[in-house]
Amino acid sequence: MDKKIKKIGVLTSGGDSPGMNAAIRAVVRTCAYHGLQCQGIYRGFQGLLEGDFIELGPRSVNNIINKGGTMLKSARCKEFMEKEGREKAYQHLKDANIDALVVIGGDGSFKGATTLHKETNIPIIAIPGTIDNDIFGTTHTLGYDTALNTVVEVIDKIRDTASSHNRLFLVEVMGRDCGHIALNAGIGAGAEEILIPEENLGVERLLESLRRSKESGKSSSIVVISEGGKIGKTVFELKEYVEENLSEYDVRVSVLGHMQRGGAPSCFDRVLASRFGVKAVESLMEGKSNFMVGLRNDQIELVPLEKAIKGSTKVDMELLRVSDIMST
Ligand code: F6P
């Protein structure tokens, strides 16, 4: 391997996700394994333009593989969107003798990273970390699997109370403009209906389906709604609408919110984070830059960062059909 790079900086940016700590650990330990230095950068690009750095060795990342959140903290940084901000950031990188960067985050963070790379030529490899799973070029982003498990676990609990009171629960999940969490967790938790941004089911079809469900003898129901859903009503407006039109239903709303971002990462996310971290550092050592590491067909591959940013992910529409059949 070509070892021109001596010191790598690592940061986490954007919304945190379970597995980010495991990825930091993997980057730090891969650096140590290959005799490179590693510098942690606090609060994403905000810390980069303030020079808020910390030296990280293999023992600095003990006991974090199992922790949610990110030990390096995260932020969404407006100043970094300006050229002046990025110039400041680059100066701090030079002052600290950082030769290359690993950026762990979502597509917003990737845009900042690729712009910095273009302006300064600093080698950068990105690791996809977001619960939304909305990054092109990888079947899984870090934290997605954990978030799915969290949502399923919570809906299982909601089902207990829903069935005790013969109620309908509208459960709103995260995912921004993408229905991966709603669709997969919805099927996993046995939801009667799943509303995702990619397909507008329409309120009338929802009512129809709930009517059928009652007629078929179901006493309680769960509807999973993605926060980016296109039904044109908030989850609270939808509750009122259903109650007005289907008086037989006693409806409750549960917005799961940020609990979906926390908690110990699943084994899948820990392994993925470790593989991503190794690939990111070794790719930089091989002289690669401006790529994202991604998972495809169980292999870790490099995806051009531009593609990862511009491409869009697709939910598997067959899963909607599966969900329909399952709610018979
Ligand atoms: O991108 C991750 C995510 O949790 C989305 O699912 C959600 O829409 C958004 O971040 C919430 O952002 P914030 O934590 O800034 O409120």
Image (spheres, rainbow, N blue to C red):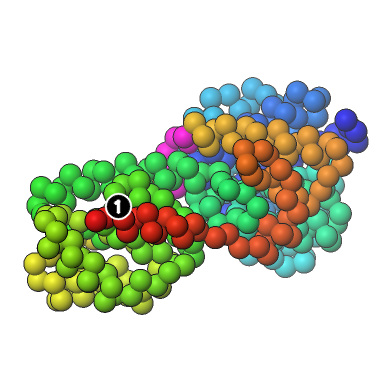
Q: Position of residue 245 (x, y in %)?
A: 15, 76
Q: Position of residue 231 (x, y in %)?
A: 36, 74
Residue type of the residue flagged with mark 1: Met
In this view, 10 is above or below 182: above
Q: Position of residue 189 (x, y in %)?
A: 31, 47
Quarter-wise, where is residue 77 in the image? bottom right
In this view, 31 is above or below 112: above
Quadrant into which the C terminus falls = bottom left
Magenta segment, principal secondary structure? loop
Residue in the image at 14% along x and 59% along y: 216
Q: Nearer the viewer, residue 56 or 288?
A: 288
On whether residue 186 falls in the magenta region, the answer is no
| Left-right relation of 252 to 90 | left
Residue in the image at 75% along x and 36% along y: 281
For label 1, count other residues whose C-alpha is less than 10 Å away and answer few (under 14), some (14-19) or many (20+). few
Residue beneath disc 1: 326
- Circle 1 SS class: helix
Q: Nearer the viewer, residue 5 or 295?
A: 295
Quarter-wise, where is residue 201 in the image? bottom left
Q: Is residue 138 visible?
A: yes
| Left-right relation of 30 to 147 | right
Q: Magenta part of the protein: which range? A: 261-266
